[in-house]
Image: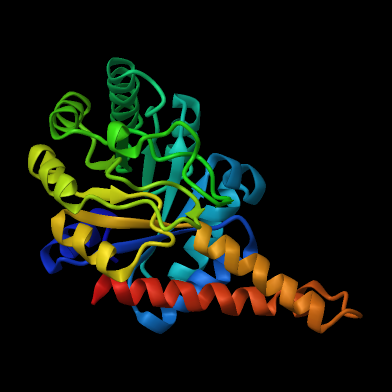
Amino acid sequence: MKTLKEIIIEARQKKSAIGQFNISTLEAFWAVVRATEKTKQPVIIGLSEGEMDFFGVKQARVLVDSVRAEKGLEIFLNADHVHSLAGARLAMENKFDAITFDGSSLSLAENIKLTRECVALAKELNSPILIEGEIGFIGSSSALLTEMPTGIAIADKMTTADEAGQFVRETGVELFAPAIGNIHGLVASGEPKIDAERAREIYSATGVPLVLHGGSGLSPTELKAVIEAGVAIVHINSDLRLAWRQGLEKSLADKPQEIAPYKLLTESVEAMQKIVEEKIKILTN
């Protein structure tokens, strides 16, 4: 079976992208698996530090390995927004395929230093894990936002090509997540606006595949533009969380006497699977 690195290289050659879909529950896991079976496209399952604590690090690895072996699916695991070397070590020791090492809240110098230590740790442990670094503001919420966070001027927080080039050269990361107007969560105001040209400049400066965080709520046109510019992975989380909640609310309203969780959660699984399938089609066509 191909490695994640090989899948990413193929995606760039095809000018397509791989979807990362975050999970924190078993029904979300099965929604991604079933969508992968149906579309026959590779996917990444992401778990943030909070999602790993809730779901279980070892359990995520075992479940992904089981469906890979049973169904021959190209499903990979990413430790999403890991903020410490201890968290990075945990992902490496549990054979995750990738880490999003997030030092974006630090100064550029501190971010470079800590991310470089993460890359060194992978070499020390002889881990083949792909390490992604990040610069710039993309927020931390996956909530439904009525407007952009107060006091945040997205244009002033975007990653520059010079910063990105320096960061990648000095850290040795193989993937890079820039701030190009993207933000975590869903914003009702219609923002953010994605700067595909900025992505192109950053891709040219770094020479490594880019990762777009905050892919929920973006239009197919925006997604295709950044993929063409150098994005090889797109993270989707908030769209799935919203589908999970709306599916559960519908089930509770339609079946007020039902108490069997698997019956109440069917709507959520189907709603999430539909979104995963739709996103995969946008990213790969």
**Residue located at (8% from left, 43% from top):** 204
Foreground of the two, 37 or 150: 150
Residue 179, given in percent of the width and then of the height, sits at 30, 40
Q: Position of residue 212 (x, y in %)?
A: 31, 51
Say which quadrant the C terminus sits in.
bottom left
Q: Position of residue 159 (x, y in %)?
A: 24, 34
Relative height, residue 139 to residue 271 (above, below): above
Where residue 133 sits: x, y (%)?
30, 35
Q: Residue at x 30, y 63 (%)?
A: 18
Instruction: Please tell me whether residue 67 is drawn above or below residue 54 in the rendered image.
Output: below
Asked whether residue 72 appears in the rendered view, the answer is no
**Quarter location, residue 246:** bottom right
Left or right placement of residue 160 versus residue 219 in this view: left
Quarter the N terminus occupies: bottom left
Which quarter of the figure has residue 77?
bottom left
Is residue 207 among what the camera can see? yes
Q: Is residue 170 above or below residue 146?
A: above
| 172 left or right of 188 in image | left
Q: How is the image coloured?
A: rainbow
Query: With respect to residue 285, does 197 lie above or below?
Result: above
Of 133 and 64, the residue lying toward us: 133
Q: Residue at x 57, y 76 (%)?
A: 271
Q: Residue furthest right?
A: 257
Residue at image location 38% in from the left, 71% down from the top: 279
